[in-house]
Image (cartoon, grey):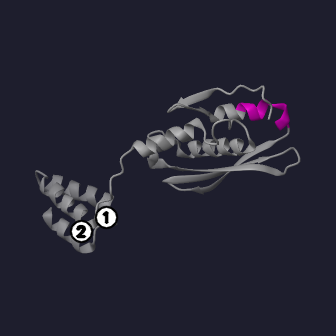
Amino acid sequence: MSNTYQFKTTNIKGKQYVEVNQRVIAFRTLSEFKGYGLTTDVLHLDAESCVVQATITNADGAVVAQGMAQEDKSSSRINQTSYVENCETSAVGRALGFLGIGIETSIATADEVDMAIKKQDTPTTPAKSNNEIYASAVTYIKEGKNKPERATRLTQIKDKYGDTLTKAQQTKLDKLV
């Protein structure tokens, strides 16, 4: 790749990373990539996660690089609304990195590294057991000041944990109202 292109980088924990937009600019403007193509395919998409594959073809249509990415809707505040877009951007950045664009320090892009650090810094809470959920539900319902409030609380619990609670537990919660 031409040594004349100067990438803007982002410093993350003392190391410089190239942003995806910089890789795209290089790909679209450098003459050595004239006629090359870039496509993305969604391999998996549901309400909680996305997997995208980006493929780069040369002027003859032969695949010369690919990159994949996976994003979870719950992994960050921005992903709550944009996990599909972020996934596509990451896949493109990785494919361009595997093509050799902007990899002076890493295949990973600044965005990927930043997200990985944020995930590591976020404490994970172990999932509550069925019995812990039931015990919390009992307390929550009992704290209701009157029957309508307890009924509302029961509905909230069933909406959120209905699949987790056993039929016997749900029947006992019904009796609390």
Which residues lie in the magenta part? Answer: 25-34
Q: Which residue is mark 2?
A: 170
Q: Tell me if 88 is positioned left or right of 163 in this view.
A: right
Gap in Å between the C-alphas at discs 1 and 2?
Answer: 8 Å
Secondary element type, mark 2:
helix
Q: Which residue is at 71% across, 41% downward?
A: 96
Please identify the quadrant where the C terminus is shown: bottom left
Secondary element type, mark 1:
loop
Q: Is residue 72 magenta?
A: no
State whether residue 48 appears in this view.
Answer: yes
- What is the crowding at mark 1: few (fewer than 14 residues within 10 Å), some, or many (at least 20)? some
Q: Which residue is at 26% across, 58% downward?
A: 157
Q: Which residue is at 75% across, 43% downward?
A: 99
Is label 1 in contact with label 2 (beta carbons under 8 Å)? yes
User: What amino acid is labelled 1 in the image?
Assistant: Gly
Q: Tell me if 122 is positioned left or right of 47 in this view.
A: left
Q: x, y (%) of residue 24? A: 70, 35
Q: x, y (%) of residue 48? A: 48, 53
Q: x, y (%) of residue 42? A: 64, 53
Direction bottom: furthest residue: 168
Q: Which residue is mark 1?
A: 162
| Magenta span main SS | helix
User: What amino acid is labelled 2 in the image?
Assistant: Gln
Q: Tell me if 36 is positioned left or right of 88 in this view.
A: right
Q: Is residue 32 magenta?
A: yes
Q: Is residue 101 above or below residue 67?
A: above
Q: x, y (%) of residue 38? A: 75, 44
